[in-house]
Image (cartoon, rainbow, N blue to C red):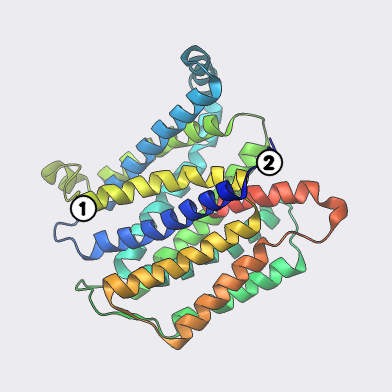
């Protein structure tokens, strides 16, 4: 499991992760503010779940070695395990809500503002870990959590204005959407970790169980929210190459995180999140005419420093093995 990997490969993982996170946020913001024929966000979330399922099937096939073995794993874990499917429908529902909230938030808030505020998922996940997994955090981690909250407060103090965005926006609705997404991210991530730790079932099998439920949940969401319009205009109404890019980035980002966590460490993970904030801000200035304020810059810097501090390994070397493995899993879930 712990094969040594080169620095070049670690840097490659970090770079791809950062670019995917920043590109997804900026591209999603672009599709919600520039396009005239606005697509249905519920269908985009549904298509993302389908692509994730197909990618997970491909990874399971690779892990199994041949189609026969892969099929027997699927039969025993999917068709003959309705209870497990039901168990994983819980994070499916929560993740579906979270993904839809991202679309609502980025329809009403700038990408840079969203990216910084969304980092509140770290204290939310930390709280869920303490309550649901009886995990403990170091003093430095608690300090970084409060620093992050302070940074996000500064960012919200005088929100930067985007001069090139010509759509009606409701910042309050955007912040409510982020708050819901943050709560969903924390709870679903920790719940999924608890299910993963309760058995030695393959990560890809668990992902398939979750995405199957996710497809059903998101399809229901499509027809409850936009049913009449989807039937009238079509499932893929308003889809442009940019929208397809958003869907692909969302799909790849969800699965790529596990590769990053497996081969890099928490510090690099923190740098990735911080670098994504910087890239999103730069892109927002260029694409949307974002006017940066001093409080926004100060807040964003505090958020970046707090993410770095949170990812530092605990100093207690007598218990280093187990907590470091747990911390890796937690970091993976935070990025989900």
> Which residue is the site of mark 2?
4
Direction left: furthest residue: 232
Q: Is residue 231 in view from this perspective?
A: yes
- The mark closer to the camera, 1 or 2, is 2
Disc 1: CA contacts within 10 A as few (<14), some (14-19) or many (>=20) = many
Q: What label does residue 39 carry, if any?
A: 1
Vertical arrangement, residue 268 with respect to residue 209, above or below:
below
Vertical arrangement, residue 265 with respect to residue 232, above or below:
below
239 left or right of 158 in image: left
**Residue 250, horizontal then vertical, whole percent:** 39, 49
Give the structural element (helix, strand or loop) at label 2.
loop
At x 33%, y 58%, the residue is 103
At x 81%, y 51%, the residue is 320
Direction top: furthest residue: 68
Direction right: furthest residue: 318
**Residue 218, horizontal then vertical, whole percent:** 35, 42
53 left or right of 257 in image: left
Vertical arrangement, residue 290 with respect to residue 231, above or below:
below
65 left or right of 160 in image: right
For the residue pair 60 and 19, the one nearer the viewer reads as: 19
For the residue pair 33 and 272, the one nearer the viewer reads as: 272
Give the structural element (helix, strand or loop) at label 1.
loop
292 left or right of 182 in image: left
At x 30%, y 49%, the residue is 245
Find the distance from the CA under tag 1 to the CA under tag 2.
Answer: 45 Å
Quadrant (top left/top right/bottom left/bottom right) for the N terminus: top right
Q: What label does residue 29 carry, if any?
A: none
Vertical arrangement, residue 113 with respect to residue 316, above or below:
below
Query: Of label 1 and label 2, which has the lower sequence position?
Result: 2
């Amino acid at each position: 499991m712990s094969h040594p990997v080169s620095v070049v490969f670690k840097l490659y993982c970090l770079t791809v992760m950062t670019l995917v996170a920043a590109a997804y946020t900026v591209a999603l913001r672009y599709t919600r503010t520039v396009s005239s024929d606005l697509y249905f966000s519920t269908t985009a979330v549904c298509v993302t779940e389908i692509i994730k399922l197909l990618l997970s099937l491909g990874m399971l096939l690779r892990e199994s070695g041949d189609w026969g073995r892969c099929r027997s794993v699927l039969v025993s874990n999917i068709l003959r395990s309705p209870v497990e499917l039901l168990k994983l429908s819980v994070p499916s529902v929560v993740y579906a809500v979270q993904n839809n909230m991202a679309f609502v938030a980025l329809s009403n808030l700038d990408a840079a503002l969203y990216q910084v505020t969304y980092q509140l998922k770290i204290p939310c996940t930390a709280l869920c870990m303490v309550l649901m997994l009886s995990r403990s955090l170091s003093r430095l981690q608690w300090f970084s959590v409060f620093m992050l909250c302070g940074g996000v407060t500064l960012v919200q103090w005088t929100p930067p204005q985007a001069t090139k965005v010509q759509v009606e926006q409701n910042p309050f609705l955007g912040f409510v959407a982020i708050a819901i997404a943050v709560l969903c991210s924390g709870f679903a991530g920790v719940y999924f970790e608890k299910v993963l730790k309760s058995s030695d079932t393959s990560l890809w099998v668990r992902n398939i169980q979750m995405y199957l439920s996710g497809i059903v949940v998101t399809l229901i969401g499509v027809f409850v929210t936009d049913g009449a319009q989807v039937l009238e205009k079509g499932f893929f109404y308003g889809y442009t190459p940019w929208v397809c890019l958003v869907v692909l980035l969302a799909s790849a980002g969800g699965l790529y995180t596990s590769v990053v966590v497996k081969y890099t460490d928490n510090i690099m993970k923190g740098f990735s999140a911080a670098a994504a904030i910087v890239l999103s801000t730069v892109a927002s200035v260029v694409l949307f005419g974002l006017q940066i304020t001093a409080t926004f810059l100060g807040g964003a810097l505090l958020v970046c420093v707090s993410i770095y501090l949170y990812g530092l390994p605990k100093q207690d070397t007598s218990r280093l093995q187990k907590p470091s493995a747990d911390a890796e899993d937690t970091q993976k879930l935070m990025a989900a």
